[in-house]
Image (cartoon, rainbow, N blue to C red):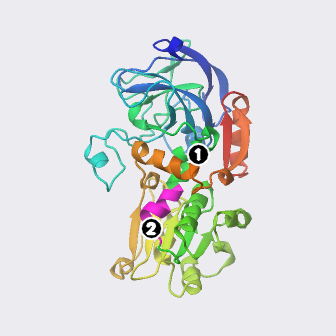
Amino acid sequence: MASTAGKVIKCRAAVAWEAGKPLVVQEVEVAPPQAMEVRLKILYTSLCHTDVYFWEAKGQTPVFPRILGHEAAGIVESVGEGVTELAPGDHVLPVFTGECKECAHCKSEESNMCELLRINPDRKVMIGDGQARFSVNGQPIYHFLGTSTFSEYTVVHTGCVAKINPEAPLDKVCVLSCGFCTGFGATVNVAKPKKGSTVAIFGLGAVGLAAAEGARVAGASRIIGVDLNSNRFETAKKFGCTEFVNPLEHTKPVQEVLAEMTNGGVDRAVECTGNINAMIQALESVHDGWGVAVLVGVPYKDDEFKTHPIHFLNEKTLKGTFYGHYKPRTDLPVVVEQYLKGELELEKFITHSVPFSEINKAFELMLAGQGLRCIIRMDG
């Protein structure tokens, strides 16, 4: 890798040129990292619903051409000026949010929302100089979430890169850089269910199943999956769900159904859909006195959360969370060690694998609702 340091690298990337159109796997040029940046060789990446959301560009300002991707694992190829905690050859996870370790948020144990590097989907260039590091025939190709992992090489701010144990299998731990930690952390770090408690999980996609896994690891005795798609229930059993509720199969509101099932309400509810009605139902489904509801899903910008204040006066608690309350550089290496010790099961989240040349198949699988995570092998 030393032979490429400081030089422009030509490599394959999957470029999104237009909204909703198949990605084009083609040669791009990747500039060297500048101050406080690192250039990574991506070995494995996976597809998340967030990638699809911005690829479809239905709910935000379209930004094209762009290289998507934010859930990945790789190796440091070279580092820019001022980078001291990473070196070529390090095994790493790039993350869509960062940890500068200097701002008030990073210094606080109560926050993981770095002032400098928190997620910004509208940012399309590097924060250092406002320029893109990707180009095709001189035309800039824009970045995505500061990671752009649908490229064999990418440039990322050093604060958005977690150095991990080189013994960790990168094709497995790559899912930690987004979906798994978002759901799992929402339960274990924010909801914090006690052993023997009852937990409801709203939405049984990949993030919701990670939240269910968190409840299982925490020792919850009842884990109730709530989803409009009953076909998801069988898979959810593998992640600890013990019971299931499909709101469409009941005439009563789902919060009333859950209250009847649990003698007044669940101890914890974790909402992983982004649907505003599910968010309200999650709060109203928890037990008075000690119930805690945690919101994970991202609602539409015009949504409004409406409920009666009596729920709060009755000592129900509503919380929000971002990336499972994990600090990327500090906490991700610890989570990787938990996996290596056998405390976490990542394999069951990975249901498909495709070579990079067939990346559009991953989009087809997700749009068809098939499987959880599709690993994209960059060497294929």
Dot 2 lies on which element? loop
| Residue nearest the viewer, comparing 127 with 138 | 127
Residue 30 on image: x %, y % = 52, 19
Within 10 Å of disc 2 (Cα), the crowding (few <14, some 14-19, many 20+) is some
| Quadrant assignment for the C terminus | top right
N-term mark: 1 or 2: 1
Mark 1 to mark 2: distance in Å? 22 Å
Disc 1 residue type (three-letter): Val
Q: How many C-alpha atoms fall within 10 Å of the one at disc 1: few (<14), some, or many (≥20)?
A: many
**For the magenta stretch, what is the residue range?**
183-193
Q: Is residue 190 magenta?
A: yes
**Observer-nearest residue: 278 or 302?**
278
Residue that label 2 marks: 192
Camera sees residue 99: yes
Rendering coords of residue 91 (x, y %)? 52, 33
Numbered badge on residue 175: 1
